Image: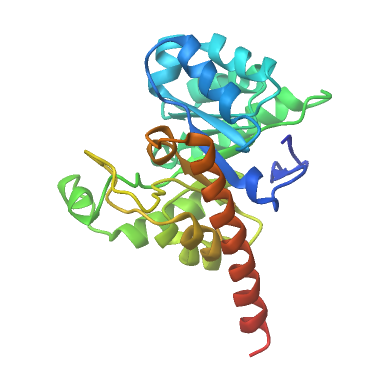
Amino acid sequence: MTIRSSSAMKNTPNRAINTPKSKLIFALDVGGSLAENLAWVDQLKGHVGLFKVGKEAFTRFGPELIHEIRARDAEVFLDLKFHDIPSTVARAAEAAFSLGVSMFNVHALGGKAMMSAAVRALAQAAAGRVDSAPALLAVTVLTSMNGDDLCDMGISQSIAEMVVRLASLAQEAGISGVVASAGDIAAIRQSCGRSFLIVTPGIRGTLAIARDDQKRIWTAYEAIRSGADYIVVGRPIRTAKDPVAEAEKFVKEIAEGIAAGSEQRVTAGSM
C-alpha cells in the first residue's frame, strides 16, 4: 500500500484502504532477534496491511529491520513519535522518507511549528521524486493514559477535549491524520472531517491480555464502525495459538465494521 500525497500534503492511501486486510496494522515490537521479527513478517505479510515498527524494535535493530521488511514487499508504519525542536524533527522526517516507509508519526504535543516543519521537510524530500510521500500522522493522547494521567501532568482539559484540540492543531499544520483512540473518532471527525486519517491503537480481541497497560481499549469492529481508517493490533495476534487465524478474525471484524459503518452513515444521511 503506497501512500501518495497532494501538493498540500493531505496524504491518502493509493490503493486498498477500503479492503479489510489493508486496514490491519500488526505491531512488530517483539524483542528477541532480528530473525524473530522477520519471521513474523514472513508469517503475516499476506494477512495484514502494514507492520508497525516502534521504539523497541527500531532501537534494537535500526534501519536494517525496515530494509528487510521492505525487501519482502511489505509496508511499514514507523512509530517513533518524533518530538523535538522543529529542525531536528524536519531532518527525521526526511530520514523516514528515505527509508521508504508508508507512514510515520510525530507527537502533536511538540507543537504546530514542529509539525509544520515536518510537513515542509517531507514535501521537499518528495518533490520531483517517483517515490510517493508517506502519510504523516500526529499522536494525540496515548491510549495508555486516562484523565487522571492528564491531571498529574497539570492539564485541566479532559481527554476528549485534549484529543480534539491536538488533532485540529495537527490538521492546521498540514498533517495527514492522527493516532487516536476509537472513543475519540466521532469528535475528531466532526472537527477535522472525513478525509483526515485516523489510526486507532488499543485494539483488543475477545481474550484478556495479561499485564495489559492499555486503559482505553476497543474491538476492531467498534473502531472501524466508528470511522477508523486503520487499526493497530499487537499482543492479541502475537499471543494467539494460531496468529494467522487470529489475524483473519480481525480482518473479518474489520469487514463487518466497514459494512456497519456504511449502513450507519447512509441511515444518518437519510434522516
Asked whether 143 or 167 is in front, the reply is: 143
Number of marks drawn: 0
Residue at left offset 41%, top offset 53%: 181
Q: 232 above or below 266?
A: above
Residue 90 on image: x %, y %: 56, 24
Q: 74 above or below 12?
A: above
- Side of 226 relative to 194 (left or right): left
Residue at left offset 46%, top offset 36%: 242
Residue at the front extreme of this rendering: 241
Residue 64 on image: x %, y %: 56, 9
Residue 13 on image: x %, y %: 72, 44
Residue at left offset 64%, top offset 67%: 259
Asked whether 1 or 159 is in front, the reply is: 1
Quadrant including the N terminus: top right
Asked whether 139 or 228 is in front, the reply is: 228
Asked whether 161 or 269 is in front, the reply is: 269
> Can residue 145 be seen from the camera position used here?
yes
> Can residue 173 be seen from the camera position used here?
no
Residue 188 on image: x %, y %: 50, 61
Quadrant including the C terminus: bottom right
Quarter of image, res 91: top right
Quarter of image, res 100: top right
Q: 14 above or below 189?
A: above
Residue at the bottom extreme of this rendering: 271
